[in-house]
Image (spheres, grey):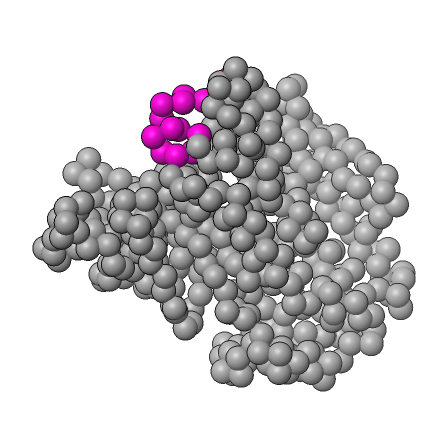
Amino acid sequence: MQFQKKEKRQTTVRFDSHHVRLRTGEVQRKTGSYMYRWTDKLGKRNTIYAATLEDLREQEEQILVDQHDGIKANIKNVTVNDVYELWCQLKRGIKDSTMKNYIYMYELFVKPTFGKKKLVQVKKSDVRRFYNQLIDDKVLKPSKLDWMRKYKFRFRGVTRVRGGEKIIFFFLDEPQILVGKDKLIMLGDLFDRGHEAKQLQQFILEQMEQDKIILIRGNHEDLFVELVTTDAGMPYSYHKSNGTYDTALQLTGFDPVMASIRHYDFADAAKDTPFYKEIIPAMLDYFETEHYVFTHGWIPSIPNRDKSYSYISSWREADREQWNQARWFNGMDAAQTADENKTIVCGHWHTSYGHSKYEHKGTEFGEDADFSPYYGPGIIAIDACTAFSGKVNCLVIED
């Protein structure tokens, strides 16, 4: 299944004892030395060792050179997909979120069709024909093609000849401009405090299967992971009040009595649900288009004691802990001091808060509470506090 393949690429961010980020396959041993594991094209597992990370990476580079030499030796049979796989290994100095989007767009649009072409047969006219086909299929708007030409994205040249070798450049520096057909973007907190968890899970899986959905991770997804991975589990009162416990009961089929008696079995069953195995791993911290950033609570910022937030221009480079924290932020407060040049569309915090505090319209939870989308400078907040209001806010955004 396509989304299972993506899950394998979304590896956990790890650091060594010197706070240097480790790449896929790199491990720091208990002795302080390092090792690197990889699987070659024959399926054989290999391991190398080094005293320092610098020495290890020198060996890694040689391995990649050897793999590249193998491709050159068999150039007549090499496909675009083969070079793409090598490119994924060689590419460095790129943000995780950008790399994930590269992979997503390539595997969605290129790999199943154009990617199967032999590299020696690819011409610039083939590439233009490929993009024209995307336009004909209404996957790509003609205006987007002009926009990409204007900003000189690399797909224009796709093939180059250097030293007698044909080299391919992979299509886009910013893949997210290939927005594709209409997408449903869900801003997290998909479950909890509702009664149709299984039906919702099935709906999301169907949208994923058809590539019609973009999933943003919310704090309630974090709570679900916490619920089923905490040893012996589960601070029940907290997860019951948030609805996480009830969601796990619905998805597993456990009744409350058996879940409390057999809590380890309950946790294992929850880990075996599609929500935990397929949906949560497919979630992003944010999704970005030309004019909008879609996220759950807010972008990583510095919370202050007076409940204000200090903007961080480098928020796209935030680590896992910063994103976990940002999912709990009140976007309507944070927007007051933000300096982002794109509009941030967020959920998490009920919009009646913004209407009441900043527009002086109604109360937060009274009869006059307004749960419609909140529009402020640089923000569109859409959380309708559905469990309380019975409403869901949906936006149609052309970007």
Image quadrant in which the C terminus is located = bottom left
What residue is shown at x 82% (from left), y 36% (from top)?
45
Location of residue 355 by image quarter: bottom left
Who's the residue at 16% across and 38% down the image? Answer: 306
Residue reaching furthest to the top: 261
Residue 368 left/right relative to 161: left
Residue 49 locus on image (x, y percent): 74, 30
Residue 302 magenta: no
Seen from the viewer's position, the closer of residues 28 and 336 is 336
Give the residue displayed 56% in from the left and 33% down from the top: 252
Classified by dominant secondary structure, the portion drawn in magenta counts as helix
Q: Is residue 156 visible?
A: no
Vertical placement of residue 119 versus 22, above or below:
below
> Looking at the picture, does residue 376 appear above or below residue 44?
below
Asked if residue 205 can be seen in this view, the reply is yes
Q: Which region shows up in magenta?
A: 231-245
* Number of numbered discs visible in the structure rendering: 0
Extreme residue toward the left, this view = 360
- Residue 229 versus residue 45 in the image, above or below: above
Q: Choose top left, top right, bottom left or bottom right for residue 376.
A: bottom left
In the foreground, 65 or 351: 351
Say left or right for 343 vs 185. left
In the image: residue 10, left or right of residue 226: right
Q: Position of residue 210 (x, y in %)?
A: 61, 61
Between residue 371 and residue 147, name the one nearer to us.
371
Q: x, y (%) of residue 346? A: 34, 54
Q: Position of residue 139 (x, y in %)?
A: 58, 74
In the image, residue 47 above or below residue 108:
above
Q: Is residue 236 magenta?
A: yes
Residue in view at x 38 percent, y 49 percent: 296
